[in-house]
Amino acid sequence: MDTSRIEAAKRGIGKYIGKPCQVCGNTERYTTSASCTACTRRHNHSSKLKIRELLKQARDGA
């Protein structure tokens, strides 16, 4: 997986090794967005937990 973003896109690979993330230092990135895979995963998990809590509050309050 040690390729550039352009090479990964040409090959149809979803992830590539890029420059280190400024937040966590991870070098694995998504080809389509160039986003850090670890930070994206962490953000998505956090968002999912917030939405679950809001839904629970709405259900309990109704």
Image: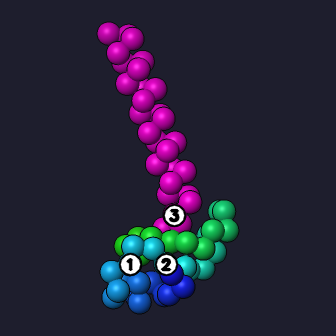
Q: Is residue 54 above or below residue 18?
A: above
- Percent coordinates x, y for residue 44 in the rendering: 46, 48
Q: Which residues are magenta?
A: 34-62
Q: Splitting the image into 4 quarters, where does residue 23 fall?
A: bottom right
Quadrant including the C terminus: top left
Tell how many labels: 3
Residue 58: x %, y % from top left? 36, 18
Q: Is residue 12 left or right of residue 28?
A: left
Q: Is residue 34 visible?
A: no
- Label 3 environment density (alpha carbons within 10 Å; few <14, some 14–19, many ≥20): some
- Can you identify the residue that label 2 sits on? 16
Do labels 2 and 3 touch, CB within 8 Å? no
Q: CA distance from mark 3 to mark 1?
A: 14 Å
Residue 55 is labelled as none
The residues tagged by marks 2 and 3 sit, at their Cα atoms, a distance apart of 10 Å
Q: Which residue is mark 1?
A: 13
